[in-house]
Image: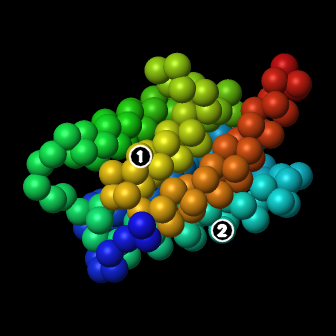
Amino acid sequence: MFGNWGFSYIGLLFLMMLFIPNIMWSKRMPQGYTAENENKILQVFERLGEILTCCCALVFTDFNIHKWTLWSLWLIAAFILMIMYKIWWVRYFRSERTLSDFYSSFSGIPLAGATLPVIIFFILGIYGKVVCMLIAVFILGIGHIGIHMQHKKGIDIAN
């Protein structure tokens, strides 16, 4: 239910794939971006969710590759979505890097920059059957997607 303790190389790989473009983004933020006026409650959910999700991804061996079963399709699905997330970042970095670009959808997924990571780690939690990860990602989703929705709403009102 809670998972098997140990190091997850798959968790590390997924976190690296998540963090590298985010680090690049810190040097290439969209024009006009500011974190001011973000809902403080959503910020708490986001930070707590980030910490819990990262810890879960690293400390449960259940995310590592095991023998092939139909259940392995969950890991493949998470990896495919991670590739989509990377493509979304490429599209953002090649764009004019406006707020609209940053809060864009991708392949029908709204607010893809926020939504895809949440979905990816939720599916990883399903694959590993780690309830702690599912709870952590739920907390993350409330904050991360909520903040992005707040920003997107601000852009829509301004336009």
Q: Residues within 10 Å of mark 2 (few under 14, many from 20)?
A: some
9 left or right of 52 in image: left
Q: Is residue 144 above or below residue 73?
A: below
Q: Is residue 11 above or below residue 81?
A: below
Q: Secondary structure at mark 1?
A: helix
Q: How far apart in space, not on screen, are marks 2 and 1 (Cα)?
A: 19 Å
Q: Residue at x 47, y 49 (%)?
A: 122
Residue labelled with disc 2: 48
68 left or right of 1 in image: left
Residue labelled with disc 1: 123
Q: Residues within 10 Å of mark 1 (few under 14, many from 20)?
A: many
Q: Quadrant of the N terminus?
A: bottom left
- Residue 58 at least partly seen: no
Q: Nearer the viewer, mark 2 or mark 1?
A: 1
Dot 2 or dot 1: first in sequence order is 2
Q: Give the camera-side residue of 123 and 79.
A: 123
Q: Give the camera-side residue of 40 and 119.
A: 119
Return the x and y of residue 84 as percentages of the image width and height. Answer: 38, 33
- Amino acid bearing label 2: Leu
The answer to which quarter of the image holds residue 20 is: bottom left
Colour logic: rainbow
Q: Residue at x 12, y 48 (%)?
A: 68
Q: Residue at x 59, y 42 (%)?
A: 114
Return the x and y of residue 144 as percentages of the image width and height. Answer: 66, 50
Q: Give the camera-side residue of 4 and 36.
A: 4
Q: Quadrant of the C terminus?
A: top right
- Amino acid bearing label 1: Ile
Return the x and y of residue 49 as percentages of the image width and height. Answer: 61, 63
